[in-house]
Image: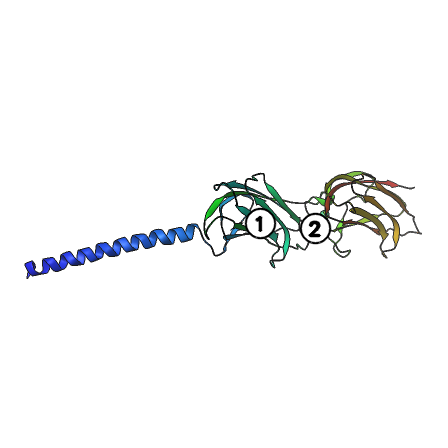
Amino acid sequence: MEAADEPHDESNGLMDFKKEIRAFFFFIFSSMVLVFPLSAQERIIGEGEHRGFIVNEGRQVFKVSPIKPGQTIQVFLSPHWIIETGGKVEWNLADQDEVRLQASSKTNPEVEPAILEWTSNSQPRPSAYTINVLGMGGSFSGEILGQFTMQVYLWDQNDGNAGTDAPETYEKALLLPVSEPGTYLFEENFISGTADVYDIFKINIKPNHSLTLKATPLHWQGSGQKSIVRWEFLNKSFRLMKGGSSPFPQLTPFAVKVFHPQVKAETKPALFYLLVKIEGEVSLIYTLQAEMKEGR
Ligand SMILES: [Ca+2]
């Protein structure tokens, strides 16, 4: 029985070996498919450096989430080409609903980084971003054309030294802490023509006190020739006390002086608003300087 079984075992062994070979090649093939995917794969990423392949007809999706109120995302993408010529990489930045915000592309031999940048408002909106990387060119679908390095940065705002963004509604306006006599400087207020279009501050002025407030454009970024920043100082009934504007790329300051008189024994402070609004494809760092004093 043993002798009769042996040849049978041998043929089984050969079949197992063939199966193993097949499994091995299937494994190699599967790994290739996984390494060079043609269907979109989504990865959740944060700040830092990320890498991937530029694949002909390949799409990679990176999701950056969650986003803090007023945060700015900056994405630097650099291609490193393997093929000599004819490759192209396109990437775009989209919001949480896949609405495209910005797009850019590079054709080899271009290697310098492209930048995508967007600022959320205080809600925050966008609340998440997706970065889509698409490869094209080459001679067949799935061909590796190169690699890319992607640097992602997230920047917080510091409007009114609050460590966040000044909201876009009067109800949620950011209190500027200047009601006691003194001189105050807020150096890093930021506004952007992407989603952070409004910054609204509220200010309390005590009876028989006067406020001198100065807003100054410090650093413009962007290109919009029709871009402008508008300043509005309003009372609690939203009546405009004084308005002004500084067109891109001017650094003309806006200044306002208000006195809140003492009426009888009233001790309640008066509420005022400063509205900052930007128009165009630009962002602006501006300073706020306040001087509060007793009397006029
Ligand atoms: Ca802001």
Residues at marks 1 and 2 touching, judged by CB atoms closer than 8 Å: no
Give the image location of residue 114, x and y in percent: 60, 43
Disc assigned to residue 194 = 2
Q: Write the residue at 22% across / 56% down.
A: 16
**Towards the viewer: 7 or 46:** 7
Q: Earlier in the sequence, mark 1 or mark 2?
A: 1
Q: Which residue bears the numbered disc 1?
A: 91
Question: Which SS class for mark 1?
Answer: strand
User: Can you see residue 270?
Assistant: no
Q: Nearer the viewer, residue 211 or 244?
A: 244
**For the view shown, which residue lies furthest in the right direction?**
264
Q: Is residue 17 above or below residue 85?
A: below
Question: Left or right of 206: which side holds 97?
Answer: left
User: Does residue 5 show up?
Assistant: yes
Q: CA distance from mark 1 to mark 2?
A: 18 Å
Above/below status of 289 relative to 234:
above
Image position of 15 (left or right of 170): left
Residue type highlighted by circle 1: Trp
- Residue 182 in percent (x, y) is at 82, 38
> 41 or 80: nearer the eye?
80
In screen coordinates, is 154 left or right of 147?
A: right
Q: At label 2, which amino acid type do we have? A: Thr
Between circles 1 and 2, the one closer to the viewer is 1
How many residues crowd around disc 1 within 10 Å: few (fewer than 14), some, or many (20 or more)?
A: many
The picture places residue 159, in percent across and down from the top left corner, at 72, 45
Screen quadrant of the N terminus:
bottom left
Task: Give the quadrant of the C terminus.
Answer: top right
Mark 2 Cα within 10 Å, few/some/many (few <14, many 20+)?
some
The residue depicted at 37 percent of the width and 54 percent of the height is 30
Work out whether 286 lies above or below 21.
above
**Where's residue 267, x and y in %?**
87, 51
